[in-house]
Amino acid sequence: MTKRPGLFGMVKSMTAEERRVVLLVSIAFILIQYDHALYGIALAQIQQDLGWSDDNVGAGLSIIRLGAIPAIILAAMADKVGRRKLLIATMILSAVATLGTSLVQTPEQFVMAQFWTKSFAFAEEALSIVVVAESVRPHMRGWAVGFLASMGGLGSGLASIAFGFVDVLPFGWRALYVLGIGPLLLVAWLRRSLPETQKFAADHPDAEKPKGGLFVHLQPVVRLVRDYPGRAMALAACVAPFGLAVTPAVLFMSKYLQEGHGFSPDQVGTTYLLGGVFAIFGNLLAGWLSDRVGRKPTITFSLFVTTGGFFLLYGLSDIPVLAVSVIWVFAIFGYFSGEIMYNALGSELFPTSYRSTASTFRLIVYTVSGSIGLLLQSVLYTQFGLETQETLMILLMGTPISIFVTWLLLPETANRDLDEIAPEVVKGL
């Protein structure tokens, strides 16, 4: 039986190649989450600068989240031509779209620029998780995916630090996006040395010589649902309620801290920084624990923590700033942990030839359901006259559904070899 290293002994027990791959992928995760955090944390400033009304902001944010849909094309191509090429391409395209975001002049332009930024970022995120899942040994797979989430927490922390200076930076919130362009291009350059995963190379000896056009690259998308309908639909049924419930709560948090709790931008930045720092260690712990007690118990704990935390934040008023910050830290920790556990499941439940497509399928379900949640928030706000915090608390009631369906429909994947969980010959559940 494989000896289990301690939480901080995992890095030492990795091979040199495992460490190299995880490092190159995790650096990009920092930048992805930096970008993901910006449009939520700076929402109030973006609205004010672009003249974006509260009546329309929920619908606009929902369209941005739909950028995950084009990402499946890139992921499907990765299942045909390899992970490495697409990881480099998504970094470059993300830099271009981020530059476009910094130059927008209207809400519509912002939504379009961020739609494509999110598309490339979502594809990068899905592919990164797949590369890690295929490159590390089974007994440390959960820890490695948790490490990615921790680096994502660092990215959110960096975004919060930068946001603290939003009122003094030239061009305000636009400068926050400009700061991310150079690092994106640098990571793309560094990835020239990133090897193709051995599992993909072994299963796809002709991957460097793809034939046909776009429809050939899209074949894995059709085959995923056709050959594994049970697992695909089960994963979607678990992820959708989580995305619908939690996405609006996360994106409106900075705006509500400023308008509902009277936080200044630097106080919001400090609070987000605390959450990012806590997430770095908390997600490592969650990934490590999921390798020991299982993915499903870890998901259950994470979703209870994030739901309870956000209920307190939006339901309580006139509480000390410190108390608000502490509650938010736990809420965001649960959110990151739950998300990364579903990320892991999305890459573990399907065989190698479907894995990138399946990981992005999970991401699309999550983001589309988040878009629906944002649309529902807008409807509750405009049509029923509810306050923002009331609409968000109503939507948060969907997270227990994810917990129930996860236990009912999904297998436990912790500490199992990927070929054992989903060999190429398996059909359906």
Image: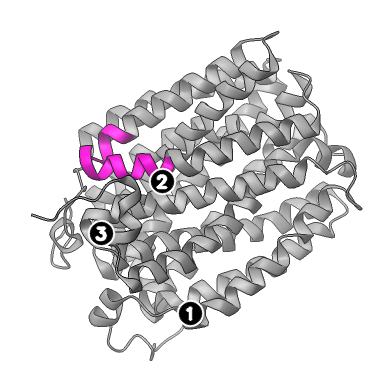
Residue where numbered disc 2 is placed: 340
First in sequence: mark 1 or mark 2?
Answer: 1
Rendered image: mark on residue 85: 1
Q: Amino acid at mark 3?
A: Phe
Q: Is residue 236 visible?
A: no
Image location (x, y in percent) of residue 58: 68, 35
What range is drawn magenta here? Answer: 283-298
Left or right: 202 with respect to 261? left
Q: Is residue 109 above or below residue 256?
A: below
Rendered image: mark on residue 282: none
Q: Is residue 331 above or below residue 23?
A: above
Question: Which of the two residues, 324 or 67, is positioned nearer the viewer here?
Answer: 324
Q: Amino acid at mark 2?
A: Ile
**Between marks 3 and 2, how big is the CA–CA gap?**
17 Å
Q: Is residue 192 visible?
A: yes
Q: Amino acid at mark 1?
A: Lys
Residue at (52% x, 36% y) in the render: 278
Provide the secondary structure element on which disc 3 rests.
Answer: loop
